[in-house]
């Protein structure tokens, strides 16, 4: 199925794709086509992970009542956080699953929680795939996890690490404002920007 999704589509230049992807906080009142959602989920499944553990489960929230409940759990009235989330026709709830023995052992030895790194890669696969389909997305890290778990039936032993909104963006693509290359890249030693 995965290979068939992309046979008749000309791939977007990767640089153009990266420049197109942004955190969209305004969405059109337009549903996401099921075939586009399937392509995005197929791309997400192909994300790499430490020791191929694939420590993730994704809940696609597209029921309007449940989606509004999840949106309420992401918004904060006092700080004005995430009030746009009700506009998004789809919320993707990313649940951390246990990793395999090799990844767990590596996490313990190196004191680095590999599943969080893996979920970050998984999430970016989703956002880049969405951009390639003309959709907008936004990763949401500010939410009431207990409420989201209750709404979506996530077992108490598991963690909801991220929510991604998905839909057609209402705004235009913005120019990216990023630190200069020499501020974030060095060669051979930390802080050495000489080639």
Image (spheres, helix red, strand yellow):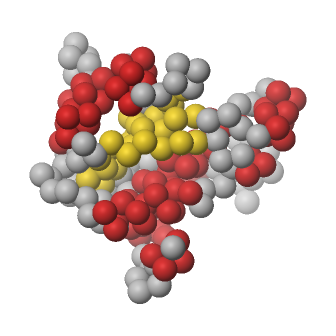
Q: As rendered, which of 103 and 194 lies closer to the eye?
A: 103
Q: As rendered, which of 29 and 111 lies closer to the eye?
A: 29
Q: Is residue 63 above or below residue 81?
A: below
* Residue projecting furthest to the top: 78
* Residue projecting furthest to the bottom: 8
> Can you see residue 67?
yes
Looking at the rendering, which quadrant does residue 61 occupy? top left
Image coordinates for residue 158, horizontal then vertical, percent = 57, 25
Residue 190 vs residue 82: left or right? right
> Can you see residue 186?
no
Task: Determine the residue positioned at 20% across, 34% down.
Answer: 65
Image coordinates for residue 142, horizontal then vertical, percent = 38, 25
Residue 58 vs residue 171: left or right? right
Q: As rendered, which of 177 and 137 lies closer to the eye?
A: 137
Work out which quarter of the rendered image holds the C terminus and state it: bottom right
Residue 27 vs residue 107: left or right? left
Task: Determine the residue positioned at 50% across, 51% down.
Answer: 124
Residue 3 vs residue 65: left or right? right
* Residue projecting furthest to the left: 29
Image coordinates for residue 3, horizontal then vertical, percent = 54, 77
Image coordinates for residue 116, horizontal then vertical, percent = 62, 35
Task: Determine the residue positioned at 42% across, 24% down.
Answer: 149
Q: Is residue 39 above or below residue 140?
A: below
The tally of labels here is: 0
Task: Determine the residue positioned at 58% across, 49% down.
Answer: 121
């Amino acid at each position: 199925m995965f290979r068939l999704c992309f046979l008749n589509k000309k791939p977007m230049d990767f640089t153009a794709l990266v420049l197109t992807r942004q955190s969209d906080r305004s969405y059109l009142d337009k549903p996401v086509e099921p075939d586009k959602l399937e392509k995005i989920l197929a791309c997400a499944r192909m994300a790499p992970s430490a020791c191929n553990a694939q420590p993730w489960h994704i809940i696609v929230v597209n029921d309007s009542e449940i989606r509004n409940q999840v949106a309420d759990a992401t918004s904060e009235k006092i700080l004005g956080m995430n009030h746009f989330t009700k506009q998004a026709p789809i919320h993707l709830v990313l649940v951390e699953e246990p990793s395999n023995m090799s990844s767990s052992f590596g996490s313990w030895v190196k004191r680095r929680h590999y599943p969080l790194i893996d979920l970050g890669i998984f999430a970016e696969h989703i956002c880049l795939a969405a951009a390639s389909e003309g959709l907008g997305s936004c990763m949401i890290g500010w939410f009431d996890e207990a409420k989201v778990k209750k709404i979506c039936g996530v077992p108490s032993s598991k963690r909801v690490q991220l929510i991604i909104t998905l839909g057609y963006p209402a705004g235009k693509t913005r120019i990216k404002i990023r630190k200069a290359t020499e501020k974030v890249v060095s060669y051979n030693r930390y802080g050495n920007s000489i080639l």
